[in-house]
Image: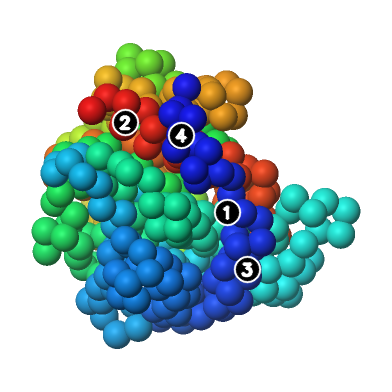
């Protein structure tokens, strides 16, 4: 059980204070949407609310022990590092990943205003608005934890550090969020203790996430009249057959991994198409080119770079052996026109935002503390893994951080229309954090 002294000192999550801060944050969410070039977030709006909420218990005013620092790498896009100093050097517990940007929301598609905090008339536990689950609710939650520590000043051996970050929802711009903080060494001391990434959902430890590889498979054939199909190379047929062959090879080379059962992944690695495009034309034209796009979700037991190389090999091999590798569709369907010395061709390309999955260390003190706290507060512990992708955390793990992940929003409203969270879930998250700190204190 968590230390009664600390639990009694910090108490529970104050609803009035939490809701008041969250209301300010959600009120900024229209200007926090991250989808450039249409939407460029201004995380400094949230950062300033966090700083203001903590100022009275900070060293800036002399009213408390919190050391609060804003760090910006781009105009209007701040990160915030907050430290409650402990007494033993090198003893650290950190809560990181509470990001201050949100995914876009279209008000016309919602049942309520996404850009203001509202309450369900029939369920006061529901707090509604864009960012309540992902991730402004967690920003307010950890800010309230740090504020409470600053108010009651419990004697702790561990320093407790909260890191609120910019630019989590889009990877087209880099170096201005947690990646910038790591590059500048501002988080180095967090390596000596567990780092809890607070940006998942459903109150259980998320112990594994998937890597993500966005891909584009382009087929080039020969455009011709559909009534003279024997003179065409149908790029659509070729691309569909090629993708079928590539998927077959992918699932042979990257089958379900034995560790996926240990980590309770809901699915193994998958490769699937999600978009189709071509330059356009009439119904009586066989298209000369088209592109199928999609993604690979890869469990962390396989290397994304290895998969990329294998896909390139598949395409190169198919190009060399079009006649014998791909099935055709009908008596005149073909991918080579010998009389014209013309061959169809496939090209595969990848977006720059390839992400690696992560498998958390199940033997670390951070994982054990999170599980024990979850069982104590939530009533049960059921670690899970998904092939959804979380940016940045694998890079932290590779840098030597003991990364564990958790969150107290709702997975069913993650990036969804009509997003909401439950205050009762956030309140349990507050108690989980207090329990984790207490457990680590008892180890010293």
Between 126 and 351, the one lying in front of the other is: 126
Mark nearer the N terminus (3 vs 4): 4
* Mark 3 or 1: the one toward you: 3
Between 160 and 399, the one lying in front of the other is: 160
Marks 1 and 2: CB-CB under 8 Å? no
* Residue marked by disc 1: 133
* Residue marked by disc 3: 20
Q: Residue at x 59, y 45 (%)?
A: 12
Q: Would you say residue 179 is visible in this rendering?
A: yes
388 shown above or below 392: above
* Residue marked by disc 2: 440
Q: Residue at x 33, y 43 (%)?
A: 155
Between 441 and 415, the one lying in front of the other is: 441
309 shown above or below 179: above
Q: 10 Å neighbourhood of mark 2: few (<14), some, or many (≥20)?
A: many
Instruction: Indicate the secondary structure of the residue bearing disc 3.
Output: helix
Residue 5: give its label.
4
């Amino acid at each position: 059980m968590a230390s009664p002294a600390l639990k009694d000192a910090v108490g529970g999550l104050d609803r009035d204070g939490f809701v008041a801060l969250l209301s300010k944050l959600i009120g900024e969410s229209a200007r926090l949407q991250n989808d450039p070039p249409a939407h460029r977030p201004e995380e400094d709006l949230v950062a300033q609310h966090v700083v203001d909420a903590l100022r009275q218990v900070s060293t800036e005013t002399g009213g408390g022990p919190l050391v609060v620092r804003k760090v910006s790498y781009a105009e209007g896009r701040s990160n915030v590092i907050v430290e409650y100093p402990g007494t033993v050097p090198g003893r650290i517990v950190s809560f990181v990943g509470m990001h201050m940007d949100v995914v876009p929301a279209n008000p016309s598609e919602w049942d309520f205003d996404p850009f203001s905090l509202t309450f369900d008339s029939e369920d006061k536990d529901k707090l509604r608005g864009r960012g309540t689950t992902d991730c402004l609710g967690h920003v307010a939650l950890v800010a309230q934890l740090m504020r409470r520590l600053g108010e009651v000043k419990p004697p702790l051996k561990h320093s407790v550090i909260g890191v609120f970050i910019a630019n989590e929802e889009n990877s087209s711009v880099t170096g201005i969020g947690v990646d910038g903080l790591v590059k500048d060494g501002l988080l180095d001391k967090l390596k000596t203790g567990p780092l809890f990434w607070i940006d998942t959902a459903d109150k259980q430890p998320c112990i594994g996430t998937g890597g993500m590889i966005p891909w584009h498979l382009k087929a080039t054939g020969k455009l011709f009249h559909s009534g003279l199909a024997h003179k065409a190379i149908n790029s659509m047929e070729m691309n569909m057959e090629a993708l079928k062959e590539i998927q077959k090879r992918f699932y042979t080379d990257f089958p379900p991994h034995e560790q996926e059962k240990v980590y309770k992944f809901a699915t193994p690695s998958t490769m699937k198409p999600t978009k189709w495009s071509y330059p356009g034309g009439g119904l009586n034209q066989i298209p000369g080119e088209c592109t199928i796009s999609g993604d690979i979700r890869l469990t962390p037991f396989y290397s994304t770079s290895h998969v990329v190389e294998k896909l390139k090999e598949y395409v190169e091999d198919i190009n060399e052996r079009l006649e014998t590798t791909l099935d055709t569709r009908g008596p005149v369907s073909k991918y080579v026109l010998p009389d014209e010395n013309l061959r169809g061709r496939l090209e595969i390309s990848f977006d720059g935002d390839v992400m690696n999955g992560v498998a958390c260390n199940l033997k670390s003190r951070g994982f054990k503390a999170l599980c024990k706290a979850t069982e104590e507060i939530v009533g049960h512990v059921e670690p899970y893994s998904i092939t959804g992708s979380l940016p940045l955390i694998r890079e932290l793990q590779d840098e030597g951080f003991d990364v564990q992940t958790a969150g107290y929003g709702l997975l069913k409203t993650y990036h969804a229309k009509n997003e909401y969270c439950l205050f009762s879930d956030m309140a349990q998250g507050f108690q989980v954090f207090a329990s984790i700190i207490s457990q680590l204190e008892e180890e010293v």
